[in-house]
Image (tube, rainbow, N blue to C red):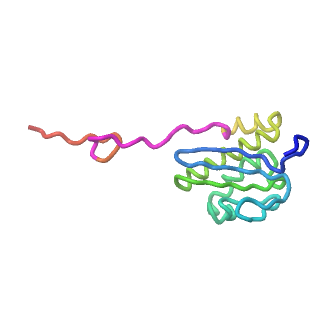
Amino acid sequence: MDKTEEKNFVFAIGRRKSSTAEVHLYKKDATVWGGTAVKKGEFFVNNKPALEYFGKSFEKTYREPLEITGMQDKLAVSVQVRGGGKMGQLEAAILAIARALDKIDREKFHSILKKKGMLTRDPRVRERRKVGMGGKSRRRKQSPKR
């Protein structure tokens, strides 16, 4: 790629629990991995519309980073998520979108996203199961009384 040629997208990764989200924010209409055509203002997750993937109840949540920065109709969003459950994937996607927006214009968006806590990686993960704990992480087996 020529150094003067500008990329059509911004890429970022977000993680939460065991989920990983890779986000491409496109400045123009584009065809993404998998052959899906994405137009400005559209939001795709794993080549499905985000509304179909996450459901109606989480629509406000995954659009929040775009809305607080005023970029909801200026960018096309494509997210690839894997691992974990729906909530972990959703939170990983939000972190990745916030990081990508921060790359677009750090001076303008960083303080807004930081105040809302969207640039902070949540470090909490599932605790591993230990040997001799009766199948759980912290549970101890009951000892005999006598």
Q: Would residue 26 be found to the left or right of residue 131 on screen?
A: right
Q: Which residue lies at the image location 61% right of the left edge and 38% below the top edge?
A: 121
Quadrant housing residue 60: bottom right
Q: Which residue lies at the image location 89% right of the left edge and 45% below the top edge?
A: 5
Q: Does the magenta stretch include residue 39?
A: no
| Residue with the most extreme front position | 1
For the C terminus, the image quarter is: top left
* Residue 72 locus on image (x, y percent): 79, 53
Q: Tell which of 52 and 35 is nearer to you.
A: 35
Give the magenta part as a residue range. 118-134
Image vertical order of residue 1 relative to residue 81, above or below: above
Image vertical order of residue 141 relative to residue 46, above or below: above
Q: Which residue lies at the image location 61% right of the left edge and 47% below the top edge?
A: 92
* Residue 40 locus on image (x, y percent): 83, 58
Q: Which residue lies at the image location 64% right of the left edge and 36% below the top edge?
A: 120
* Residue 23 locus on image (x, y percent): 70, 50
Q: Is the magenta stretch mostly helix, strand or loop?
A: loop
Q: Is residue 119 magenta?
A: yes
